[in-house]
Image (cartoon, rainbow, N blue to C red):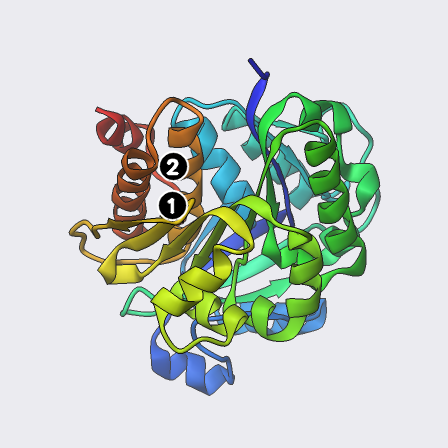
Amino acid sequence: MHKYDVYGVGNALVDFEFEVTETRLSELGIEKGVMTLIDEDQQIILMNNLSDTQSKKSSGGSAANTIIAVSQFGGSAYYSCKVANDDTGDFYLADLQACGVDSNLNNNPREYGHTGKCVVMVTPDADRTMNTFLGITGDIAANELDPNAIADSTYTYLEGYLASSETGHRAAIDARDHAKQAGLKTALTLSDPNMVRFFKGNLEKMLGDGVDLLFCNELEALEFTGMDSISDAASALSQKASTTCITLGAKGALIVDSGQNFEIPAYPTDAVDSNGAGDMFAGAFLYGITHGMSIEEAGNLASRSAAKVVGNFGARLSSEQVSGLKN
């Protein structure tokens, strides 16, 4: 038995989530539905332009959302990341600890700088658009890793957003190699269509000769493979991973495991906010397969959990919601 079910590595970002109209996005000149990297001055201007809109604040980043979900479901989790010695970094660490997640931040000095922030804009169709200033997390490197924790984890989970950083994608490769050398399992999420569009080469390096588990959505799968259909994309991706999970929004999900296809149904929800749906799917699935569930059982838990989080404003579930999903 390992101490941790999942060890994650990713960009540490404090999310500031706003409800906006599509007209507002257009007025701000923001591309809808994707993550765009911006500098700090651009983000300050953007947040000033949204100051008339109430925001919700939480620790985030794609892998962090997944790792927190694993912990919420009752799994054990560790997260490697980088935040600064500032108030935002203090908030991030306290939130991780409150969620029961161990981290390299515990008892380690933090550098001076600016902790990364993500402005998440949610439109009435529940779509999410993100403008991200990476701050100090853009410098995440191998020294943020904990090889002992990796060796004591069933899965090592890599965030595709790390592909945008030279040191970040190399840290992800190092984490993957530590896990493989220990004979342990690896997982990767492609994270966002823009990551595939602009950083495919680094994602391919992170995949290496393949991982045990790959997560992506429909757009990412088609973009990464260059295929025109999900069935063809799934077949191509299955050459890169033993198990591939492709989320399909309102159509549910397709999981390909060792050549066998599982069509996972979608579950009804009143969509409010799609932010974190893919992260929640990954977290619930990882919890399921590390706690004795079959691929299909874990897929159904993941689909139900993603539907539940889409009905919330924000990327997390309450403890009561998690308890209801497990029963």
Which picture quadrant has residue 234?
A: bottom left
User: Residue at the location (46% across, 65% down)?
Assistant: 221
The secondary element bearing badge 2 is classed as: helix
User: Residue at the location (69% across, 41% down)?
Assistant: 176
Residue 278 at least partly seen? yes
The secondary element bearing badge 1 is classed as: helix
Is residue 119 left or right of 112 when viewed as pictured? Answer: left
Q: Nearer the viewer, residue 161 or 36?
A: 161
> Do residues under tags 1 and 2 come within 8 Å of each other at their CB atoms?
yes
| Within-10-Å neighbours for mark 2: few <14, some 14–19, many 20+ | many
User: Residue at the location (39% across, 49% down)?
Assistant: 259
Could you say where residue 294 lies in the image, as x and y percent from the top left?
33, 31
Judge whether 71 appears above or below 66 on screen. above
The disc label shown at residue 284, or none: 2
The amino acid type of the residue labelled 1 equals Phe
Judge whether 8 appears above or below 254 on screen. above
| Within-10-Å neighbours for mark 1: few <14, some 14–19, many 20+ | many
Could you say where residue 6 lies in the image, as x and y percent from the top left?
55, 30
Is residue 192 left or right of 232 when viewed as pictured? Answer: right
Calculate the distance from the C-alpha at mark 1 to the C-alpha at mark 2.
5 Å
Q: Nearer the viewer, residue 202 or 67?
A: 202
The disc label shown at residue 161, or none: none
The amino acid type of the residue labelled 2 equals Ala
Residue 122 at least partly seen? no
Query: Exactly how many numbered labels are in the figure?
Result: 2
Q: Nearer the viewer, residue 218 or 231?
A: 231
Is residue 139 left or right of 92 when viewed as pictured? Answer: right
Which residue position is annotated with label 1? 281
Could you say where residue 93 lies in the image, as x and y percent from the top left?
63, 34
Is residue 183 left or right of 323 when viewed as pictured? Answer: right
User: Looking at the rendering, in which quadrant would you find the C terminus?
Assistant: top left
